[in-house]
Amino acid sequence: MLTVALSKGRICAAATPLLARAGIELDDDPADSRRLCIATSLPDVRILVLRAQDVPTFVEHGAADLGITGKDVLLEHQGVGLYEPLDLGIARCRLVLAEPAQAGPARSRPRVATKYVETTRRFFAGKGMQAEIIHLYGSMEIAPAVGLADCIVDLVDTGVTLAANGLTVCEEIAAISARLVVNKAAMKLSHGRVSALVERIARAAAENGGGCR
Ligand code: ATP
Ligand code: PRP
């Protein structure tokens, strides 16, 4: 049996048709079902439906052989024990630094609201700066307006949320899309089955107009 850890929410919604194109139909719709382990049309492949941030942990510990999650999550997790063989080209967005459109003079130690604590720390360290990081779990865009932070690091897709909260992009930190990850031990021990599944998904991603290694 091969177990695939799938990030629920946006990535699941985009990945389910891609998996179907790869001949992997889920027996239940994760958006409706409360089942967290879903069988598929391939008798030896099952899907775990997980929080995005938990996908690397399941794959790293071998509780899943493969996983599908966002590059933002992988940058933050920085796990060992994972291969990242495939960019699926779905759930694309950008991780950015954003600040109020009418920002005052920059502080030497900016206060940054984000859920991407490690990625933000590394980003500022790369500029030779220290930032005071304020860890939030969502709705980051409101933090500058209420004086909680000077700027934010968050995902942007259409830009509607930033604009609605009077923020503007200062800098792109990373281009984000969903990635396929593989447990390193599974890649060695079940090489034939794992690489056949990776190939199947890679072909479907390429047909979908995205996907690269
Ligand atoms: P959680 O509640 O688990 O913290 P979430 O509700 O933000 O996460 P989703 O929005 O369903 O979860 O999925 C988040 C993932 O989807 C991100 O990690 C990112 O890789 C991808 N993604 C694609 N577009 C966007 C977007 N516009 N906003 C947020 N995430 C996006
Ligand atoms: C996500 C993200 C941004 C927004 C970006 O939030 O954190 O707030 O979408 O999309 P846009 O550029 O198209 O407006 P989400 O809806 O997941 O809510 P959250 O703040 O609870 O994470």
Image (cartoon, rainbow, N blue to C red):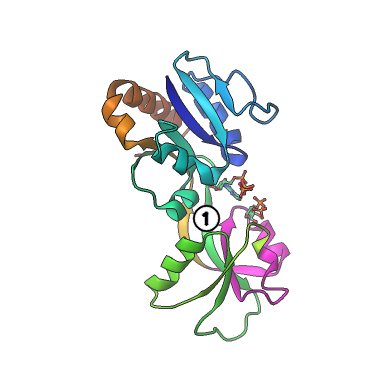
Kindly identify the residue that appears in the image at 33 percent across and 42 percent down.
81
Q: Say whether residue 57 is left or right of residue 188.
A: right
SS class, disc 1:
strand
Residue 131 visible from this viewpoint: yes
| Percent x, y of residue 19 | 50, 26
Q: Say whether residue 119 is left or right of residue 107.
A: left
Residue 89 visible from this viewpoint: no
Q: Where 122 sits versus 19, above or below?
A: below
Q: Where 94 sits versus 171, above or below?
A: above
The quarter of the image holding the N terminus is top left
Magenta stretch, residue numbers: 141-170
| Percent x, y of residue 163 | 68, 64
**Which residue is most to the left?**
188
- As for residue 198 lying within the magenta part, the answer is no
The quarter of the displayed image where residue 128 is located: bottom left
Kindly identify the residue that appears in the image at 44 percent across and 33 percent down.
63
The residue lying toward the viewer, choosing from 1 and 74, is 1
Kindly identify the residue that appears in the image at 60 percent across and 18 percent down.
27
Query: What's under tag 1, amino acid-wise?
Result: Arg
Q: Say whether residue 84 is left or right of residue 111.
A: left
Label 1: how many residues lie within 10 Å, few (<14), some (14-19) or many (20+)?
some
Instruction: State how many labels appear.
Output: 1
| Percent x, y of residue 46 | 50, 22
**Which residue corresponds to mark 1?**
94
The residue lying toward the viewer, choosing from 158 and 37, is 37
| Percent x, y of residue 209 | 46, 34
Kindly identify the residue that appears in the image at 38 percent across and 71 percent down.
126
- As for residue 147 lying within the magenta part, the answer is yes
Any atom of ligand 2 within 8 Å of the CB at mark 1? Answer: no
The quarter of the image holding the C terminus is top left
The quarter of the displayed image where residue 60 is located: top left
